[in-house]
Image: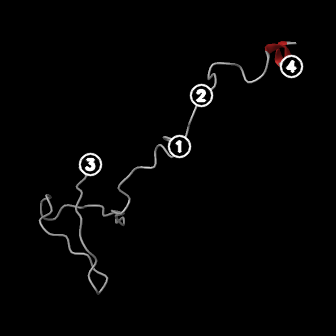
Amino acid sequence: MEAVRIEAKVQSNGRVVLNDLPFEEGRDVEIIVLETHRKQTEPKSNPLKGSVLKYDDPFEPACPPEDWEALR
């Protein structure tokens, strides 16, 4: 199935008109309508980026090995 992305504005009567579709006349198509969100320009994939100020010892265990119950 070929996907085509077309952006259009909703008219005052609630209709959306799609022109110049790249399909032959009479072909069946599926239409899915999604609202675009253009105001979100920066992805939120790294919300903690830049929040770490200092590493004391990042590879040091959180507790001494003798305190681990799993090792007993």
Name the residue nearer the viewer: 23 or 33.
33
Tell how many labels.
Answer: 4
Q: Residue furthest bottom?
A: 13
**Residue 1 badge:** 3
- State the image coordinates of residue 23 (x, y, percent, origin top left): 15, 58
Secondary structure under badge 4? helix
Instruction: Please state the horizontal and vertical placement of residue 45, each as a whole percent of the image.
Output: 46, 44
**Coordinates of residue 70 in the picture (x, y in percent):** 83, 18
**Three-letter amino acid code of the residue under disc 2:** Tyr
**How many other residues sit within 10 Å of disc 3, few (<14), some (14-19) or many (≥20)?**
few
Work out how far the residue at label 2 is from the one at label 4, CA to CA, in angstroms: 27 Å
* Amino acid type shown at disc 3: Met
Q: Nearer the viewer, residue 67 or 13?
A: 67
Q: CA distance from mark 3 to mark 1?
A: 39 Å
Disc nearer the start of the sequence (4/1)? 1
Q: Are marks 3 and 2 in contact (CB under 8 Å)?
A: no
The quadrant of the image that shows the C terminus is top right
In this view, the mark in front (3 or 4)? 4
Q: Earlier in the sequence, mark 3 or mark 4?
A: 3
Q: Which residue is mark 4?
A: 69
Determine whether the residue tagged by mark 3 lies in a helix, strand or loop: loop
SS assignment at label 2: loop
Which label belongs to residue 55?
2
